[in-house]
Image (spheres, rainbow, N blue to C red):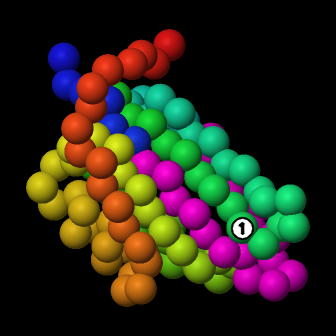
Amino acid sequence: MSDPIGFIIRIRVKEGLLDDFIEHYQSSIPPDEAGRPGTLVQLAYVSEDGTEVTIVRIFSDADAMDLHLEGAGGRSKKAYEFIEPDSIEVFGTPNSSTIETMKKIAGSGVALKVDPRFIGGFVR
């Protein structure tokens, strides 16, 4: 069995666009849930002041993460009308090209941290 893998992305919401981003994000959930069965968790949280959003995703394995990232460039382009990525944390060992793909999607200046070694736990 392959190890699960996940990432957390923190984004800044452009001024006055939180409601628009929430609508955009929520409309992305049904197709992600239906078309990406290896995405086990996808959760988003807004900061108290409404200026930041944190999105948490957990995948069954590195291949499921890659499937999730397919087409992400186009999806991100629309999202970037409302937000700017701030940082990405990856937990687990992604496939070799995944980090480069994430860097391209996020753009320059976005902090990226990888904790590759899974030492145990569970997903229900």
In the rendered structure, which amino acid carries the disc numbered 1? Answer: Glu
User: In the displayed structure, would residue 65 be above or below residue 28?
Assistant: above
Stretch of the chain drawn in magenta? 7-32
User: In the displayed structure, would residue 57 be above or below residue 74?
Assistant: above
Front residue of 107/122: it is: 122
Q: Position of residue 79 (x, y in %)?
A: 60, 72
Q: Secondary structure at mark 1?
A: strand
Q: Is residue 76 visible?
A: yes
Residue at image coords 81%, 84%: 15
Q: Position of residue 4 (x, y in %)?
A: 32, 30
Q: Which residue is mark 1?
A: 52
Q: Is residue 27 visible?
A: no
Residue at image coords 50%, 52%: 8
Q: Is residue 65 left or right of residue 50?
A: left
Quadrant in the picture for residue 121: top left
Front residue of 97/91: it is: 91
Question: Is residue 15 covered in magenta?
Answer: yes
User: In the displayed structure, would residue 19 be above or below residue 70?
Assistant: below
Quadrant in the picture for residue 123: top left
Residue at image coords 27%, 67%: 101
Q: Residues within 10 Å of mark 1 (few under 14, many from 20)?
A: some
Residue at image coords 32%, 73%: 103
Question: Is residue 4 covered in magenta?
Answer: no
Q: Is residue 11 left or right of residue 112?
A: right
